Image (cartoon, helix red, strand yellow):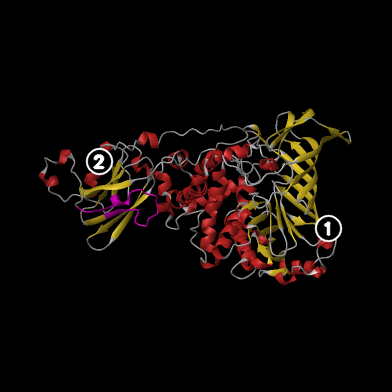
Amino acid sequence: MTRIKPRRHALRHRLRSLFSVSSTLLAIAATPALAQYQPRETFAPRPGEQAVNVYRSSNGLPGPQYWQNKADYQIKATLETDKPAISGDEVITYTNNSPDRLSELWLQLDQNIYKTNSRSAYADGKAPEGTTDGFVLDAVSIEGGGKGDSVSYTVSDARMRVALPKPLAPKGGQVKLHIRYHFTIPGDWGGRMGWGPAKAGPIYEIAQWYPRMAVYDDIRGWDTLPYLAQEFYLEYGNFDYYVTAPSAMLVAGSGELVNPQEVLTSEQRSRLDKARASDATVAIRSPEEVGDPKSRPKKDGTLTWHYRMENTRDVVFAASAAFAWDAARINLPDKKTALAMSLYPAESQGKEAWGRSTEYLKDAVERFSKRWFPYPWPVAVNIAGPDNLAGMEYPGLLFDGIGDKTKDLFWVTAHEIGHTWFPMVVGFDERRHAWMDEGFNTFIDVYESDDFNHGEYGPKRDVEYAPGGGNPVDEIIPTLKDPAAPPILSRADTIIEKYRHPVTYFKSALGLVLLREQILSPERFDPAFRQFIAAWAFKHPKPDDFFRAMESSAGEDLSWWWRGWYDHNWTLDLAIDKIGPAEADKDDKDKPEKANQPRPTAITVSSHDKLVMPVVLRVDFADGSHRDYTLPAESWIRQNATTVFVEPDKKVVQATLDPDHKIPDINRDNNVLKAGGK
């Protein structure tokens, strides 16, 4: 048994007892503190930024009076390919569940990011690749007394304020907002949406395509942070939407297709039924059928596709005459099922490319559902579109690249569908806290890459996890040592592209890996993480909610970890400073019978920098054996060094810190020391 010596005055008793027990004892050494490390700084109290109240509890879970507003949408849109443009007519039913009377509504007009004078254009500091007129609002009205009443509204960049004729009542008050609008679809420079060519015709990937409600929450009221190309913070609700497009096109949308009998052939409907019962991928429209008039129920004109999705924060769609289409059953917990589908142009087919997309999608959804939380929707769709638009996630539907193949296609598919859990289910505010959705999702990717097909594409070492392709704890060190690198807890808009992946994705994900595998253990981390996901499903947690939830459920004060890894960009440098005979207690020096007895070997381990972590110390003995000791973070809570005492009958030849290379120590030269070294 290994123990931590809690007080200096107990040293005498412990040294005396070493001769009668075979266990190894740990004690805090009285070596002078190193200048770089101050225990009271590393282990200082860490007050949360967010108050505990009836809305958000001290255990990090929703409080007994947690509330959340709701936005339901009915949208009728037309894809005008000759321009190309979208015209739409939407009705938003907004429910005010807050305790406040609301005198206005705020909406997000994300298409305005493409206007020449958008705030985003100035924030980027460079000329945009293309511009549009953004959302053109043709009419805005509020339903009241059975008729539409025009309302006063103000557009400010990518936001709109609607003044209500009378305040919206708290705790259940409802209003219906009608908006007619149109906008030009950006080209493949659109970033998260747009259109681009395929051999058999253009592919349209349509997102941010309707004015949508801003979030009103218990933290800030209306959260109207400008859209500067960070992602989204949205209310949940139900969507009922219609997309009219040329009849030659397949239209894939978030949610479930309501009218397959109107937009699919009888053969395609039969194949879909087969796919719903098949673990193997079934072709719904094969690459060879692309362009065949028989693969569409109507030769000319348009068709209207009707989709419905419940309890979601957004919906998107993709449309093209070039799409091949396949699908397979997803097996979910409790014997539930869903459908994995992929749509891609003929040139993307093949076993090394999109021919395996549905297999990848199915596997990721099944494993994420089993490990963390069940997939909540009936369909998951992967779309192959213009490569410049690739790698973007939306509820139930992904935009990936025509040219993606093998491990790159697997990784991007797993990552983008992983966003279902963060932030589509757990509704993080991506505008402010991009590290939460990107980092948490990259974290769960790690285990999917290990698991898929016996590690066919594992371990995950792509640019989103380990930029240089090596050991993650080594790959993070340049970021930790970079004085200009921002802390994780920075406003997302302030993080420049140089640091976006290293900090927002990689460091955030690695922080969870280290928390799970080195600090807490999977046995403590996993139940706490699952509880956090389940409690905040379809709700809006903040960083402090996560920190409190993990501490409360996993049973650990982690303030030192949040401070070093998240609040700051601190570095870790643990070192073996000395191996030698333990000093005898001063009271025993005058007693020959004590002074002449064999003394234990003392191994001194110090913290040379501000970040600390639990670490494994491996001690090699002369008989060829070794022993591992786990030193907790509290080894350095009072002083800069801790001492491991090894019983006298074990001859120490060498000691090694972190022998399995699991922690991000910036100086490994001081991690190994032979006996007699200093």
Question: Is residue 118 at least partly visible in the picture?
Answer: yes
Q: Position of residue 253 (x, y in %)?
A: 73, 55
Q: Which mark is residue 303?
A: 1
Tell me if residue 350 is in the magenta stretch.
Answer: no
Judging depth in this view, the residue of 237 and 535 nearest the camera is 237
Q: Position of residue 578 (x, y in %)?
A: 23, 47
Question: Is residue 234 at least partly visible in the picture?
Answer: no
For residue 510, above or below residue 404: above
Label 1 to label 2: alpha-carbon separation: 83 Å
Contact (Cβ within 8 Å) of mark 1 with mark 2: no
Q: Quadrant of residue 98?
A: top right
Judging depth in this view, the residue of 526 and 389 nearest the camera is 389
Looking at the rendered image, the disc whose residue lies closer to the viewer, 1 or 2, is 1
Residue in the picture at 64% in, 55% down: 374
Q: Position of residue 79 (x, y in %)?
A: 78, 52
Of callouts 1 and 2, the N-terminal one: 2
Give neighbour class at mark 2: few <14, some 14-19, many 20+ (Cα, 10 Å).
some
Magenta-highlighted residues? 655-675
Tell me if residue 671 is in the magenta stretch.
Answer: yes
Amino acid type for the residue under numbered disc 1: Leu
Would you name the residue on which mark 2 appears? Answer: 11
Give neighbour class at mark 1: few <14, some 14-19, many 20+ (Cα, 10 Å).
many
Residue in the picture at 74% in, 69% down: 274
Left or right: 394, with 504 as reference point: right
- Say what secondary structure mark 2 lies in: helix
Q: Which mark is residue 209?
A: none
- Say what secondary structure mark 1 lies in: strand
For residue 127, above or below residue 322: above
